[in-house]
Image (spheres, rainbow, N blue to C red):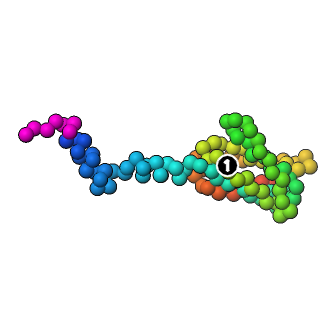
Amino acid sequence: MKRSRARVTAWALFAALTLGAIPSVATISAAYAQNVGQRSVGGLVVDGESAPVQGATVFLKNSKTKAIRSYTSASNGRFRFAQVNMTDDYDLWAEKDGKKSPTKTVSSWNASKEYETELKLK
């Protein structure tokens, strides 16, 4: 009894999937989903002497859509943006009383769910 090459290949692939030798589509999708979704972006706004700055405006700008979100730093200088899309790149900076921090990039290549940084006003 002769079997076609395609039929043998299909059965070999089915057997490999069943035995776990090849990751299933569900496994690949689950791994991909870990790098997609939402993250938080937070940190600390400080002055030239590294003291926390209350009331600074922190900006988070989507590099693709140009949409800007803002947050006012707390009494301890902390800020936090929740639900930041991990598949987009963002520019992040702070301003207060004519002083501005250098702009930092929050990259879509960074897979961390919590991005923390310090923004120093100059």
Residue 17: image x %, image y %? Answer: 31, 50
Which residue corresponds to the image point at 75% horizontal and 46% vertical from the top-left?
60
Query: Where does the magenta region start and end?
Result: 1-7
Q: Quadrant of the N terminus?
A: top left
Residue 7 relative to residue 78: left or right: left
Looking at this view, is 5 or 53 the one in front? Answer: 5
Which residue corresponds to the image point at 56% horizontal and 48% vertical from the top-left?
36
Residue 28 relative to residue 10: left or right: right
Which residue corresponds to the image point at 88% horizontal and 55% vertical from the top-left?
55
Residue 26: image x %, image y %? Answer: 42, 50
Q: Is residue 26 magenta?
A: no
Residue 83: image x %, image y %? Answer: 68, 51
Q: How many marks?
A: 1
Residue 7: image x %, image y %? Answer: 20, 39
Residue 108 relative to residue 33: left or right: right
Which residue corresponds to the image point at 19% horizontal and 41% vertical from the top-left?
8
Question: In this rendering, does residue 79 appear at all?
Answer: yes
Q: Residue furthest right?
A: 97
Looking at this view, is 14 or 43 the one in front? Answer: 14
Please, what is the three-letter code of the amino acid marked with disc 1?
A: Val
Q: Is residue 3 magenta?
A: yes
Question: In this rendering, does residue 121 appear at all?
Answer: no
Instruction: Read off the residue under disc 1.
Output: 84
Q: Tag 1, which secondary structure?
A: strand
Mark 1, Cα crowd under 10 Å, few <14 / some 14-19 / many 20+, is many
Residue 90 relative to residue 76: left or right: left
